Image (spheres, rainbow, N blue to C red):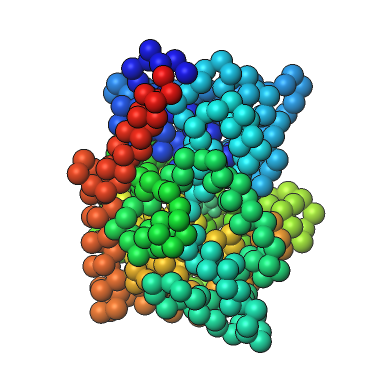
Amino acid sequence: MDSKSPKLEIFFFPYVGGGHQIPMTDLARLFASHGVKSTILITPSNTLLFQKSIQRDQQSGHDINLHPLKLPPGEPDIADVTMSAAPLTDTSILRDPLHLLLQEIQPDCIVVDMFHLWAVDVVDGLGIPRIAFGGNGCFFSSAFDSIIRHTPHEKVDSDYDPFVVPGLPDRIEMTRSQLPPMVRNNSTGFGDMMAKLEQGSFGFVVNSFYELEPAYVDYFKKEMGKKAWLVGPVSVCNRNVEDKAERGQKASIDEHSCLSWLNSKEPNSVLYISFGSVARLAPQQLLEIAYGLKESDHPFIWVVGKILKSSGIDGGGGGEEENWLPDGFEKRMMESNKGLIIRGWAPQLLILEHPATGGFMTHCGWNSTTEGVSAGVPMITWPLGAEQFFNEKLITDVLRIGVKVGSVDWVSWNSKQEVSVGREKVKEVVERLMGGGDEAAEMRKRARELGEKAKRAVEEGGSSYADAEALIEELKSRRKIDS
Ligand code: UDP
């Protein structure tokens, strides 16, 4: 270690995928704003994605940079320029470049994403302090741990019979159909992975904040005995329009057209609909959403992403499928100024934080969840896979800031998708949240209060600010011991 360097230096090693790379980049930016020298390790084709926001941070005096790991000659990059490495892609091709870099510059600490599990041995072998990043919150970790320990899902007769998750601070009911197959089959894969990530690490850095899930932070730390620093929501570090608009990828819509469309709408009148960076719905499901939106007649921004036949979701033989909307739907929505359809990447933070946005139909990815919370927006929850059914429980049953659409079957992001929610249900939940009843007003009030707490948490004097400082102090005192 370079004990002469006055600054604490932390490396951040994100997995190459939207839901992982985006929050860890924000995490690095957040620590840089606390006076740390932050270095983000990326693959060469990823360099451009975050360059502009990093440059802006540098211009405002923060010590932060991107470091591309050099791949062996002739090796293709893991992710393409759209950051779209598939979940669980083997990234161990980066082992030698990481090892070389860490030998050359030994940082005070490295934050390692759970999907780079192989990196644990490299980092620990060099005696560099390591911090684990799982990318999810304490509610999920607590509920998951309880299910693995007590196997309540084995005591019900069918996949759709509810069981109570034992020992949690709230009464949480789930069904076997909502659990990932590895949990249903009692495979210890994920638990083992997290155990390996944690073993020998300094602890977890978590993209959450104490006031969001206090009972579960306590459960995570006391019942499960984990060491954790809650420093989020990390997305709050995006304070200007440029940062919010260019997060991870260039948005498919110009931010000014998006903002002027939103500016033309009443406060809290627009529903924003997005299913994250990975999920793709079946064209028939999109059709049901389109009809539901048309019937409910509320303004909306809908991010449909790209629908690829080759993804297997429509059983087709490759190429792009664009003709899934009802005839003339998009034209009518545009002409009437009722709906904005974004194909590709949306400036999500910009939309969520606009005063006209009054609801978020979400797949409950953890980043989308914390971003919706920070924006103070109530949600319509439509979980699909990963740990999203757990996040739905937090949003609807614990925080009471969301309405369930009624999705009950866990599906893998790359399996053939079915229609799970019909147009009538879509219309019903949209009206429940956007229609202005008492229930929606209560949810909106709770969401707004939570949004204020989220923003306060990362400000000086807030709980996340204090946790970030505590981690920095701990690393500094470790440095003194070692030197
Ligand atoms: N995102 C975005 N524009 C899009 C889709 C996604 O900015 O069109 C961002 C979103 O703000 C979030 C991340 O991508 O930060 C998605 O992460 P999340 O955990 O919600 O879902 P995942 O993509 O991992 O399923």
Pick out the residue farthest to the left: 461
Q: Residue furthest right?
A: 317
The residue lying toward the viewer, choosing from 370 and 378, is 370
Q: Is residue 52 visible?
A: no
Relative vertical location of residue 325 with respect to residue 131 in this rendering, above or below: below
Q: Residue at x 49, y 49 (%)?
A: 135
Report the quarter where the C terminus lies: top left
Q: How many marks?
A: 0
The quadrant where residue 56 appears: top left
Q: Give the residue drawn at x 58%, y 77%.
A: 152
Q: Name the residue: 23% across, 55% down.
A: 452
Where is residue 446 shown, x and y percent of the image?
26, 67
Drawn side of residue 85 relative to residue 463, left or right: right
Residue 94 versus residue 270 in the image, above or below = above
Examine the rendered structure and indicate whether residue 378 appears above or below residue 231. below
Asked whether residue 99 appears in the rendered view, the answer is yes
> What percent of the width, then of the height, locates residue 238?
34, 39
**Residue in front for this viewpoint, 265 or 242:** 242
Residue at 58%, 32% in the rendered image: 124
Outermost residue, front side? 481
Q: Position of residue 394 (x, y in %)?
A: 41, 67
Q: Residue furthest top?
A: 4
Measured as percent of width and height from the top left, residue 14 is found at 54, 37
Image vertical order of residue 264 relative to residue 98, above or below: below
